[in-house]
Image (cartoon, grey):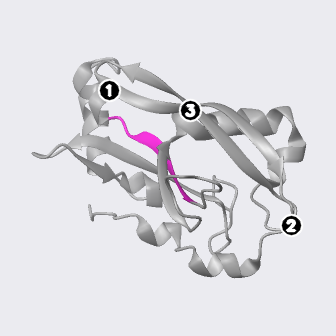
Amino acid sequence: QSRYGTTPGEVWYKRPYWVHRGFGANDEKVVCLSTIKQKCPICEHRQQLMKDGAHWSDDVVKALRPKLRNLYAVIPRNSKDYQEEVHLWDISQYAFQDILNEEVQENETFETFPDLEDGFTLRIRFNEESFGSTKLAKTSRIDFNDRKKPLSEKLLDDVPSLDDLLIIQSY
């Protein structure tokens, strides 16, 4: 069993992963190799900087720290902007999953939300937050709505393997 509560090969509603931002000449995002339990040269460099006396709050050290994100396969319902088909949604742990976790801890009935038969449809609302010049949407409210009927297992045929969608560079 992994630290994310699933056994490899088991269907799960999200794919957590770690990412380094601002990497290279094009300020790209790079999946941290710790995501797949391998040594990461960026994390090793960060550790070496701290070992050599840099403080964890130094800008260079903070910039190298990986951030936790989650990848989801979602179907927007009753949206004027999106078709009711599988979409990929990539969002930080902070901006969604932490809030979802709080809601589920507050009412354990909702922990079955991803279940095809006994689950719930989520209605998610967002507020805009700013970090310096960066603006992001952060979940402000989640409603767990009863489904009129269970979802079909055939629905999973259209969902790609979230593990296979991550582009992971070699060391």
**Of the pair 92 and 62, the residue shown nearer to us:** 92
* Residue 72 part of the magenta segment: yes
Q: Label 1 near label 2: C-beta < 8 Å?
A: no
Say which mark, if any, is on residue 1: none
C-alpha separation, residue under disc 2 versus residue under disc 1: 40 Å
Q: Residue extending furthest left? A: 25
Q: Residue extending furthest front? A: 80
10 Å crowding of disc 1: few (<14), some (14-19), many (20+)? few
Image x and y of residue 107, in percent: 87, 36
Q: Is residue 25 above or below residue 103?
A: below
Kindly identify the residue that appears in the image at 86 percent across and 61 percent down.
148
Image x and y of residue 22, in percent: 22, 39
> Which callout, 2 or 3, points at the residue further toward the start of the chain?
3
Residue annotated with mark 3: 126
SS state under label 3: strand
Q: Label 1 near label 3: C-beta < 8 Å?
A: no
Q: Amino acid at mark 1?
A: Thr
Image x and y of residue 46, in percent: 28, 35
Image x and y of residue 74, in percent: 59, 59
Query: Which image quarter is the C terminus in?
Result: bottom left
C-alpha separation, residue under disc 2 versus residue under disc 3: 27 Å
Q: Amino acid at mark 2?
A: Lys
Query: Magenta stretch?
Result: 65-73
Quadrant of res 143 = top right
Q: In the figure, is residue 91 to the left or right of 134?
A: right
Query: Which image quarter is the N terminus in?
Result: bottom right
Residue annotated with mark 1: 134
Residue annotated with mark 2: 149
Q: Is residue 137 above or below residue 21?
A: above
